[in-house]
Image (tube, rainbow, N blue to C red):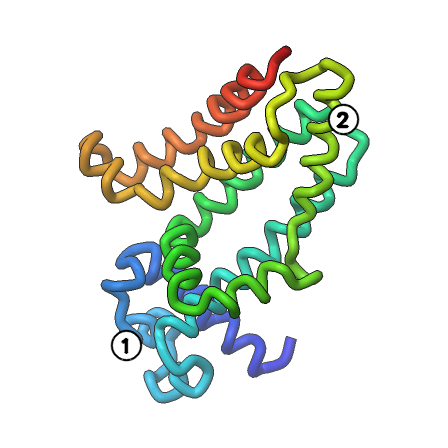
């Protein structure tokens, strides 16, 4: 790794820590520079603003998680095992990047075309069509209910993502702290998996 790449990675890791503590709205570039151990001018040399920094973080996260999804979908594991592994990996990724859902929503509204171009690129595009085809085949064999497969995939993603997108509201209503919330999300891996599997039982 070159010196420039090392500095950029150090900045991204520092920004990730600050964003997780303060959220994107509360974070300041000076705080990120301090966390990275560099001056603000150098930070601006690599990233012009908070939005560009957060974009770098979420793109890095997608590049890590989506290839894992594609590897899982390409295995010969039974459908139930694939669903469980997908849910576990998705929630793990969100626990590591709890601000990601909020930023994705922000980015979709700010620059929808750029966001879609990135998601649809071969580099990161999740091959959920493989899962859709698998579910359709299982339905034809009578192994699961003939529910439109795309809705099953949407339900799985929504059940994983929503608690993180609505985390401030959930924590406030339930009166829980970050540690308790994260514990609930760990428990949610099994709950979501079983909920989906029960919903599609024939």
Q: Residues within 10 Å of mark 2 (few under 14, many from 20)?
A: some
Quadrant in the rendering for residue 142: top right
- Where disc 2 sits, the SS reads helix
Quick one: which residue is furthest to the right in this view? 76
Which quadrant is home to the N terminus?
A: bottom right
- Please name whichever residue, 200 or 169, is drawn nearer the observer in this view of the structure: 200
- Residue 79, position as x, y percentages in the image: 70, 26
Seen in the picture, residue 34 relative to 148 is either above or below; the reply is below
Residue 161, position in %: x, y?
44, 41
Taking 16 as reference, is 11 above or below it? below
Within-10-Å neighbours for mark 1: few <14, some 14–19, many 20+: some
Judge from the rendering whether residue 151 lies leftward or rightward of residue 21; answer left or right: right
Q: Residue at image x 66%, y 17%?
A: 144
Image position of 38 with respect to 64: above or below: below
Query: Reading the chain from its start, which is encountered first: label 1 or label 2?
Result: 1
Please give the label number shown on residue 30. Answer: 1
Q: In which quadrant is the C terminus drawn?
A: top right
Residue 74 position in % (x across, y down): 77, 40
Q: How many marks?
A: 2
The residue drawn where x is 36% and y is 78% is: 49
Residue 20 badge: none
Under circle 1, the secondary element is helix
- Residue at the extreme top of the image, as rendered: 202
**3D distance between C-alphas at marks 1 and 2:** 54 Å
Residue occupying the point 66% across, 63% down? 121
For discs 1 and 2, the disc positioned in front in the rendered view: 2
Q: Which residue is mark 2?
A: 137
Looking at the image, which residue is at 49% across and 68% down? Answer: 56
Q: 175 and 70: which one is in front? A: 70
Task: Find residue 28 and report its horizontal and vertical position in percent.
Answer: 26, 71
């Amino acid at each position: 790794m070159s010196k420039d790449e090392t500095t950029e990675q150090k900045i991204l890791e520092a920004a990730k820590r600050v964003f997780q503590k303060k959220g994107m709205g509360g974070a300041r570039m000076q705080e990120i520079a301090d966390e990275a151990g560099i001056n603000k001018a150098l930070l601006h040399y690599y990233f012009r603003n908070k939005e560009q920094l957060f974009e770098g973080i979420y793109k890095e996260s997608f590049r890590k998680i989506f290839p894992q999804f594609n590897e899982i979908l390409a295995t010969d594991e039974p459908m139930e095992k694939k669903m469980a592994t997908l849910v576990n990996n998705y929630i793990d990724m969100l626990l590591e990047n709890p601000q990601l859902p909020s930023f994705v929503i922000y980015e979709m509204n700010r620059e929808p075309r750029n966001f879609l171009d990135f998601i649809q690129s071969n580099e990161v595009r999740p091959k959920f069509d493989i899962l859709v085809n698998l579910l359709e085949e299982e339905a034809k064999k009578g192994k699961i209910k003939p529910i439109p497969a795309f809705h099953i995939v949407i339900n799985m993603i929504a059940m994983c993502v929503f608690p993180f997108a609505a985390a401030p509201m959930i924590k406030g209503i339930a009166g829980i702290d970050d540690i308790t919330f994260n514990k609930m999300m760990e428990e949610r891996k099994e709950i979501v998996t079983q909920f989906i599997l029960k919903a599609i039982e024939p």
